[in-house]
Amino acid sequence: MLAIEADALRRTYTHRTGWLRPRRTETEAVRAVTFDVAPGELFGLLGPNGAGKTTTIKMLNTLLLPTSGTARVFGHDVARDPVAVRKRIGYVFGGDRGLYDRLSALDNLRYFAELYGVEARAQRRRITELLDLVGLAGRERERVEGYSRGMRQRLHIARGLLHRPDVLFLDEPSVGVDPVAARDLRRTVADLAAAGTTVLLTTHYMAEADELCDRVAVVTGGRIRALGTPESLKSRVGERAVLEIEAYGVGEDRLERIRRIPGVRGAAVEERGTAQALTVQTDRGAELHAPVLAALDGVRVGRVVSREPSLEDAYIAIVEDAERAEADGAGPEESHADGPGPGESHADGPGPGESHADGPGPERRGPARPDSAWPGPAPRGPEHPGTQEVPA
């Protein structure tokens, strides 16, 4: 049995604008997303902000109902049997919400252990195990308000594991965390996967996905654009070389001038403090240092390095190809770099004139539980900021 099955998932948000002449508009945040995750696999969803990663993960963990399509966790349908799904999942999200600052880490874990229905005689042993796992042993009696961002994130992971979930959803757990804390978080996540926990990780940090994930799906515009192992995705740009240039003041006009150079396959710039990192993908074997630097005439240039393509370069190439296809009016296609995963189909949603047999289920009302696998009533507290649905 597969741990997670998503088949042609869609989620559409309806907005109302205007007062005298109200107008309804629709935003399709997730468009026919299909993938499978095997038990014990560490699966990554990669994509920029607003790509649909968080919306997808919220449909899988029962916080949002799909507009159409189906999703199952260990055989339980997320729309028809949400209580059974919640008993088998944990949810960890990035940010400062979800913990009580004035309580100690130990008291936070005791509180959530009660919510998750952990037996009283097992709570002490389980909390001790998790504090050791996330590296907070010896600091558990300190108030959370004095914790660093990285320590908070590790406590979030401990909270999500209290009831021994079969599937753990990690929604950008390392966002805003310093490099040392991010390294510790990655080690914790790797240990969880090695112990047999199925992990679905969303991130826009390519190095994190490359190091941790067994397979990754690149999501942009609400669609999966590519799916495969990190190595198979990198092989998509294996015929390319990468020129990385430290620069100051590269504008869009310079980028367009570089992109028009014969042999250049793509160019992107990233702000890094006061400097910029200009990445130029070229055909392998093409000597384009001189024409690229000539296109940057008048721009202050620092270090220039040639290197092999990385997962980030593959990601950029996939996203740029998708953007070009959208601009040209072509329908975006999902690309499987190494074939479908276990039990995976290439279905891309209903065709013209078709409809899903199941159809969308009724909207669930009441406060959502963003972090709980326990089906009881949601308590009042900082981890439940409200039920407003915002597209990822």
Image (cartoon, rainbow, N blue to C red):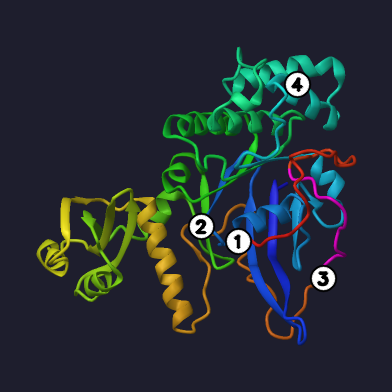
How far is disc 2 from disc 1 in space, using C-alphas? 8 Å
The residue that mark 3 highlights is: 359
* Mark earlier in primary sequence (4, 1): 1
Main SS of the magenta segment? loop
Circle 2: is it few (<14), some (14-19), or many (20+) Cα within 10 Å? Answer: many
* Mark earlier in primary sequence (4, 2): 2
Q: Position of residue 382 (x, y in %)?
A: 74, 39
Amino acid under label 2?
Gly
How far is disc 3 from disc 4 in space, using C-alphas? 43 Å
Q: Taking 162 as reference, is 315 left or right?
A: left
How far is disc 3 from disc 1 in space, using C-alphas? 21 Å
Q: Which segment is the magenta one?
A: 360-370
Amino acid under label 4?
Asp
* Mark linked to residue 47: 2
* Mark linked to residue 107: 4
How far is disc 4 from disc 2 in space, using C-alphas? 36 Å
- At a point 55% along the width and 68% down the height, the residue shown is 221
